[in-house]
Image (cartoon, rainbow, N blue to C red):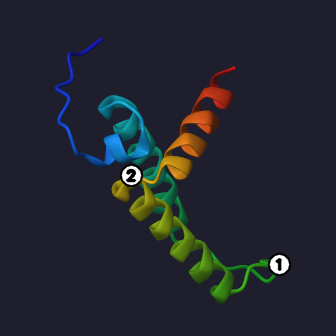
Amino acid sequence: MRDVEQVAGGPWDRAGVDRETWYAARLMAAAIRETVRLALKPTERDEALPADHERLGEYADGLVMAVEDGDPETVAMLVRRAKGSVS
């Protein structure tokens, strides 16, 4: 495991996790955001409206901002999801 320097006052402190866990949550949030931004090829059977994609994009942006701000609930949710997908 890498030696990670702990810097006091970062968003990881506000989230109540170590810096490495916070970075993992931030990476997951960013991956969700970038996945949402992928261009979708519209089809006649596409049930999603452009407004749906816009709302999803706004949610994904908010998810990244919450992690960057050190929101403990958002970070905990992402960490739980990551641990749940491993099993």
- Where is 59 relative to 86, above or below? below
Circle 2 residues within 10 Å: few <14, some 14–19, many ≥20: many
Residue receiving disc 2: 70
Q: Position of residue 60 (x, y in %)?
A: 52, 65
Q: Residue at x 57, y 82 (%)?
A: 54
Location of the N terminus (image quadrant) = top left
Closer-to-camera residue (43/53): 53
Q: Position of residue 11 (x, y in %)?
A: 31, 48
Disc 1, SS:
loop
Residue receiving disc 1: 45
Q: CA distance from mark 2 to mark 1?
A: 40 Å
Q: Position of residue 69 (x, y in %)?
A: 36, 58
Location of the C terminus (image quadrant) = top right
Mark closer to the chain start, 2 or 1: 1
Q: Residue at x 60, y 44 (%)?
A: 77
Tags 2 and 1 in contact by the CB under 8 Å rule? no
Q: Amino acid at mark 2?
A: Gly
* Numbered disc in front, either 2 or 1: 2
Circle 1 residues within 10 Å: few <14, some 14–19, many ≥20: few
Closer-to-camera residue (79/49): 79
- Where is 85 relative to 35, above or below? above
- Where is 32 relative to 65, above or below? above
Q: Residue at x 20, y 29 (%)?
A: 6
Q: Position of residue 2 (x, y in %)?
A: 24, 16
Q: Amino acid at mark 1?
A: Arg
On the picture, is 47 further left or further right than 17? Answer: right
Residue 24 is labelled as: none
